[in-house]
Amino acid sequence: MSPPTDPAKLWDVAFGAVRQITGAFVDGLTGAPPSPSKHDGVPAAPTRTTGLDTKMRALLTRALEQSTVSGQTELFHRILDQLVPDEARILGALSDGSASPMVSVHALNRAGLLGEALIENASLVGRTANVALPQLTPTYVGHLISLGLLEPGAEDEHLKDDYQILMADTDVLAAIRRGSLGPVPARVEKRTVRLSTLGHSLWTASMGDDSGAGTEA
């Protein structure tokens, strides 16, 4: 057994005492012992849960306080923040209530069943709106549909000439060639696209007092 004056034994005792004193001093400064999650570097789960709960309660409180007009205005601001200038041009081109021809081209498999979409939402509305990037018109139209601002409709026989122009589009022709399987042509789906009710409301509200926006509570 080591004698009481063993230097190694004395060092262990002294080091333990220092650790106890240091820990008590730190606890006194913070007012509480450190959270175990801070020792292992993992954030405490209740913090994230509380944050989500706070956000949801704040939204519910605001919903009780909002009027129809203020709620609609906030929604429209959020939607506009997701648009690019070319998409705004498309909304403007359809704001008169007109419809534009739209086609999607699908490949057919060997069983004659509908396969992958080679091009979707190709439309003349990009040309009508004079967008800066007409080749992105299918992307623009698809995005506006996903936001609920545009809505697809059935083929319009009165737009026969416009469909012929659209079918002659370089990208549409390329998709038809890729989708054809020998003598079996690709499947072309002809539709129309126009402003939805939400799209009309957004356009009217965004154009200011001249369009009669914001007259209802």
Image (tube, grey):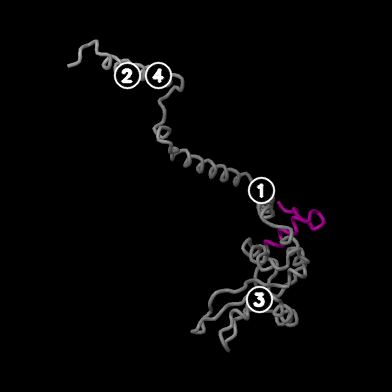
- Residue that label 3 marks: 103
Residue at 50% from the left image edge and 84% from the top image edge: 110
Residue at 51% from the left image edge and 43% from the top image edge: 52
Q: Are marks 3 and 1 in contact (CB under 8 Å)?
A: no
Query: Relative to 1, is 97 above or below?
Result: below
Position of residue 13 measured from the top left corner of the image (x, y, whole percent): 29, 16
Which secondary structure, mark 1?
loop
- Residue that label 1 marks: 67
Say which label, 1 or 4, has the lower sequence index. Answer: 4
Spatial CA span between label 1 and label 4: 57 Å
Q: Are marks 2 and 1 in contact (CB under 8 Å)?
A: no
Spatial CA span between label 2 and label 1: 65 Å
**In this rendering, the label closer to the viewer, 2 or 1:** 2
Name which residue type carries label 3. Answer: Val
Task: Say if the magenta span includes residue 67.
Answer: no
In the rendered structure, the answer to whether residue 1 lies left or right of residue 109 reads left
Name which residue type carries label 1. Answer: Ser
Q: Which residues are magenta?
A: 198-217
Which secondary structure, mark 3?
strand
Quarter of the rendering containing residue 84: bottom right
Q: Are marks 2 and 3 in contact (CB under 8 Å)?
A: no
Q: Residue furthest front?
A: 7
Position of residue 28 measured from the top left corner of the image (x, y, whole percent): 43, 19
The residue carrying pointer 2 sits among few (fewer than 14), some (14 to 19) or many (20 or more) residues within 10 Å by Cα, namely few
Query: Relative to 184, is 76 above or below?
Result: above
Q: Mark on residue 22?
A: 4
Spatial CA span between label 4 and label 2: 10 Å
The residue carrying pointer 4 sits among few (fewer than 14), some (14 to 19) or many (20 or more) residues within 10 Å by Cα, namely few
Spatial CA span between label 3 and label 1: 40 Å
In the rendered structure, the answer to whether residue 40 lies left or right of residue 183 reads left
Q: Mark on residue 16?
A: 2
